Amino acid sequence: MTRPTIVWFRDDLRLADHPALTAALDRGGPVVLLYVLDEQSPGVRPLGGATRWWLHHSLAAHAARIAGLGGRLVLRRGPAERVLPEVVAETGAGAVVWNRRYTPAREVDARLKESLRASGVEAASFAANLLVEPGRVATGSGAYRVFTPFWRAVRQHGVRDPLPAPPALPGGVEAASEHLDDWGLLPRPDWAAGLRATWEPGEDAARRRLDDFATGGLAHYDRRDEPAVPTSGLSPHLRFGEVSPAQVWRRVHGDVPPAARAHVGKFLSELGWREFHAHTLFAHPDLATRNQRPAFDAFPWSWDHGPEVEAWQRGRTGIPLVDAGMRELWHTGTMHNRVRMVVASFLVKNLLRHWRIGEEWFWDTLVDADEASNPGNWQWVAGSGSDAAPYFRIFNPVTQAQKFDPDGAYVSRWVDAPLEPIVDLAASRREALDAFDSIRPR
């Protein structure tokens, strides 16, 4: 009889297009479906408050979907290098399979694969969570540092076909499971009312959102820079792997309205930026803590977390577009992409605060806080990262609002009464340019 196979779920909380799950079912025999909450292993970045909220509800939805197909999701907490061998011993598993991750925690996976095989347990990992794995597209000197040629190479490489979800799951073997409610992922006191009103985590909700966007919102994607116009809303579902990039790719290339077809390429290029940041993090594991451009180590950013930073966090800067974006973030756990660039530029250029202050705030408050995209985007705005030329862009929040929110529909939703500005935009822009000049080579 075939010994049980453990499927180790991580940021891939779905049953469709799950190569590791497919491999486990093809192997035959019992299957143990396992999620490990690991916030202790080296290279693992503990989740922020908003992503912890999402994870709770995503796991609940995942467990329900698994139960509906006859299976059971086992929950365990602790360092993966301790928990996985424990579950192997408890269940007598002969194999452990998982989908690969590309964050610094991949070193944990490599050690586990080696130790499991040394103990006589099969261990295999699969490509599932990117369109193209790091190393499959590269320049002669390593990872791409510029987006446009990177994205061209990805498109030329091609995208695999997604796998179907299994029609049923075999009954697993008994394994002790912890209770989701005991993990304390939900906030106390409860500040998540706006998140609940905005989002529905889970694979089923992700599929519905993708279908709704493909048949509706994609036709209006030429207005993607207008913050009052809804975009796809897929980023948190991608972040937790409730839908895969390959599924998104195939869906928008499928049955969409004629008016949407002209916008498919532009929409997918936004998916390409997610891909680009993942490849960048793979090549630069310290992306969240170190400037990619060493010249910016000398930039005179302040680490002061005082009143100006607090005003920025609470949406009380007196700059309407900035305040609208930060209030949207606090209420919904997300923010329109163009407004993200504006509020980030305001912090690092007009307030001259270090980009890591903003990156850490977003990490705690975004439901789609991604270990690659979050620091990658902050470094792009700061000028210290990849593909940053002209690498000292400064977004003027007044002109951005005039151009992309001319009737004030977005700002007025979040800001009812303007405040006195905490900084002069023109003067602070000159100060930022002077600071940049101080680090430029002569």
Image (cartoon, rainbow, N blue to C red):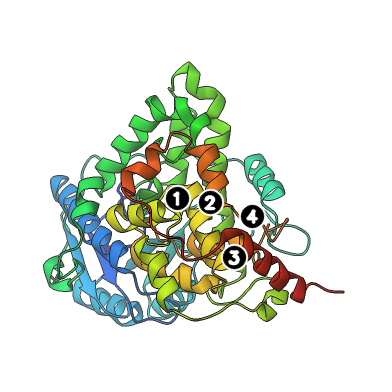
Left or right: residue 306 compared with residue 156: left
Up the image or down, 242 lies above or below 290; here it is above
Cα distance in 3D space between marks 3 and 2: 12 Å
Answer whether residue 12 is visible to the viewer in this image. Answer: no
Q: Evaluate if marks 3 and 2 touch, with contact meaning CB atoms under 8 Å apart.
A: no
Cα distance in 3D space between marks 4 and 3: 36 Å
- SS class of the residue under badge 2? helix
User: What is the three-letter code of the residue carrying label 4?
Assistant: Arg
Which residue was labeled with disc 3?
349
Q: Position of residue 346 (x, y in %)?
A: 53, 61
Say which of marks 4 and 3 sits in front.
Answer: 3
Residue in the foreground of this view, choosing between 420 and 390: 420
User: What is the three-letter code of the residue carrying label 3?
Assistant: Lys
Q: Evaluate if marks 1 and 2 touch, with contact meaning CB atoms under 8 Å apart.
A: yes
Which residue was labeled with disc 4?
136
Q: Residue at x 28, y 46 (%)?
A: 203
Marking on residue 397? 2
Question: Does label 4 or label 2 sit earlier along the sequence?
Answer: 4
Q: Evaluate if marks 1 and 4 touch, with contact meaning CB atoms under 8 Å apart.
A: no
Cα distance in 3D space between marks 1 and 2: 6 Å
User: What is the three-letter code of the residue carrying label 1?
Assistant: Leu
Cα distance in 3D space between marks 1 and 4: 40 Å
Answer whether residue 5 is visible to the viewer in this image. Answer: yes
Q: Quadrant of residue 433?
A: bottom right
Question: Does label 1 or label 2 sit earlier along the sequence?
Answer: 1
Say which of marks 1 and 4 sits in front.
Answer: 1
Q: Quadrant of residue 34?
A: bottom left
Cα distance in 3D space between marks 4 and 2: 39 Å
